[in-house]
Amino acid sequence: MLCDPRKQTPLGSARVICASLYAGPELGRVWVDNLDDADGVLDALKPYFEDARLLKVWHNYSFDRAALWNHGIDVRGLGADTLHMARLLNTSHTSYSLDALCAELDVRSNDAHGGGASKTPMKVRFARPRILKNGAPSKSAVEMPTTEQLQRDPATLADWIDYAVLDAELTFWLRLRLQNALQAERLICDVQRAAESPAFDASLVRSLYDVYVRMLRPFGEALTDIERIGVQLDGALLRRIQLCAETDRDSLLASVREWAVAHTGAPDAARINFDSAKQLQDWLFGAEGDVVKFEVENTEGEVLEGRSRPLKYRTVCVPALGLPVQAYTKANKPSADGAGLRRLAGAAPQHAERPAFGAALERLGETGCVALDKLLDAKAMQSLLASFIVPLQALGDEVGRVHGSLNINTETGRLSSRNPNLQNQPALEKDRYQIRRAFCAQPPHNTLIVADYGQLELRLL
């Protein structure tokens, strides 16, 4: 499926290039081509996928259901998600990938008869030596073909088909292994039926497998419905917020550069890259009297003596500030991270009534502490832009809704979210640009309710 779940949500982006099925040793394996000229063959399986009476087993149902939805197939009939089953059985696995679970539980193909093929990671099976510029294969560097390349190349097609259908078969046997293990885990207490769930028969819940079938499985299905619906975003508001944040950031950085030039007496101090940890380290903590050299882009077109054309980069020299080091990195370098800069600037150097200056006061004075505080403020704005404001705009679909991936495989048992992380928006007291207002209910008759875990309002709801 053409999508990297680590970087993007599958809804709207994942495409199915092939499908593989396994229904036991009597029926064997099925592989369905859905790439290039075969695009659309998957439609033949639409009635099967959408029939809720035919229970189907998946590994990561959320991703697969979303990918098939992109092809107009509304999957129904969740029989099991081995990802969720494995999590229920053991919360301490380092990984819940199909590779890791099959290796740990020694799940092999044709498991009912003992033995068979085991799961081999794609990189192990398909990585090939990188071809050097001279045409020879590298002895150390390897590259991984894309799944489309593996499927299009006659030399790898058979191996690719075997890999795909083996995934389906191993999921089949993994489900059976997990089911048996969950059934063996008997409950030591009674499950109580909530008053608002009269149809739920708590007496039938006697093992962890019963918990999975009657509670976790329908919950997993509901989560995929929630992912599909998504959350409405106010794109126009985000664009206005972006413009405002960029303007504020640029204004602060201009002020910091102006101070740097005035304090050092070096016009090239305006060329310091404040996003470069090394340049900040060298400039802030270099010994007093030392001159720090940086390579910067030669935007002025300066031509060196003896040359007829300007070089792309030029060297600038800026006096170091000689500030006291507040902390060190793991590489034993002076740390120029946010915490270190805050100790240098002080808790509140710009406070009108009770300013609190930091460790840089002795060397840089009050104006220097204020400049460092502005630099911290600009970095905070850049973080908001990079983490929330800009990515959220890119993740919206054609009607402005974002479809985060919801995950129940967390240490605490709570839900987590990614692409985007809907639970990691700026806190109310820190949301200076009111980014949270961009998450809204679709008009005209819907209301968005925001509540915090463990707080009174959530309990009242």
Image (spheres, grey):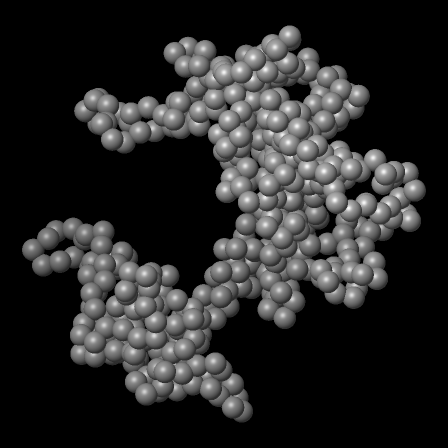
What residue is at 89 percent from the left and 44 percent from the top?
197
Number of callouts: 0
Q: Residue furthest left?
A: 306
* Quadrant where the image shows the N terminus: top right
Q: Is residue 129 visible?
A: yes
Question: To which quarter of the image does residue 459 belong?
Answer: bottom right
Work out which residue is located at the far bottom of the displayed protein and give it: 353
Q: Is residue 90 above or below residue 272?
A: above
| Nearer to me, 198 or 112 | 112
Q: Name the residue at 60% across, 62% down.
A: 426
The C terminus appears in which quarter of the rendering? Answer: bottom right
Across and down, in percent, residue 239 comes to 59, 55
Front-lying residue, 362 or 187:
187
Q: Which residue is farthest top?
A: 26
Which residue does the image show at 51% across and 27% down from the upper left? 106
Depth check: 372 or 215 in front? 215
Residue 317 in picture, x, y percent from top left: 20, 68
In the displayed structure image, the side of residue 197 where residue 82 appears, left or right: left
The x, y position of residue 195, in whole percent, is 91, 49
**Residue 399 visible in the picture:** no
Residue 350 horizontal/vertical position (percent): 48, 83
Residue 212, compared with residue 246, is above or below; it is above
Q: Identify the residue at horizontal 90%, vertical 38% (top origin).
A: 199
Q: Image height check: is 94 above or below 256?
A: above
State whether residue 144 is above or below residue 243.
above
Is 396 displayed left or right of 75 in the figure? left
